[in-house]
Amino acid sequence: MHTIAHTFGHTGAVGCDGFADPRSGLAYGYTRRRAASVFRAPENDRLAAAVHRAATR
């Protein structure tokens, strides 16, 4: 799961992810078009970090 300080969230089945950052007011949700073959989709951490960086600059 994400490692952004001051956030909380949870990974879900087939690669879904969601978190909230109360300090910035950002809420993030990600669902995949196709199910991942593992519990966590590998792109989630990079995508979540990029969204957080862009929204909090």
Image (tube, grey):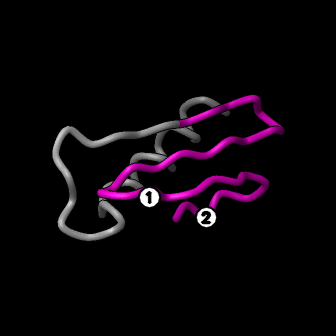
Describe the element under mark 2 as helix, strand or loop.
loop
The verdict on residue 53 being magenta is: no
Residue drawn 72% across and 52% down? 7
Extreme bottom residue here? 38
Which amino acid does the dot numbered 2 rest on? Thr
Question: Is 12 above or below relative to 51?
Answer: below
In this view, the residue in front, 12 or 46, is: 12
Q: Position of residue 35 (x, y in %)?
A: 20, 52
Query: Going 37% across and 58% down the picture, which residue do you hit?
Result: 13
- The disc, 2 or 1, on the residue closer to the chain's N-terminal end is 2
Q: Is residue 34 left or right of residue 3?
A: left
14 magenta-colored: yes
Q: Amino acid at mark 1?
A: Asp
* 22 lies left or right of 18: right
x 57%, y 40%: residue: 53
- Where residue 24 sits, quadrant-wise, is top right
Q: Is residue 14 above or below residue 29?
A: below
Report the disc number at residue 45. 1
Task: Give 54 or 17, whichever is nearer the viewer.
Answer: 17
Magenta stretch in the rendered image: 1-28
Circle number at residue 3: 2
Q: Is residue 35 above or below residue 56?
A: below
The x, y position of residue 31, in whole percent, is 35, 40
Instruction: Indicate the secondary structure of the residue bearing disc 1.
Output: helix
Q: In this rendering, would 22 be left or right of 52? A: right
Q: Residue at x 70, y 54 (%)?
A: 8
Categorize mark 1 by other alpha carbons within 10 Å: few (<14), some (14-19), many (20+): some
Give how far across and how far down residue 45 sits, in percent: 44, 58
Image position of 51 with respect to 34: above or below: above
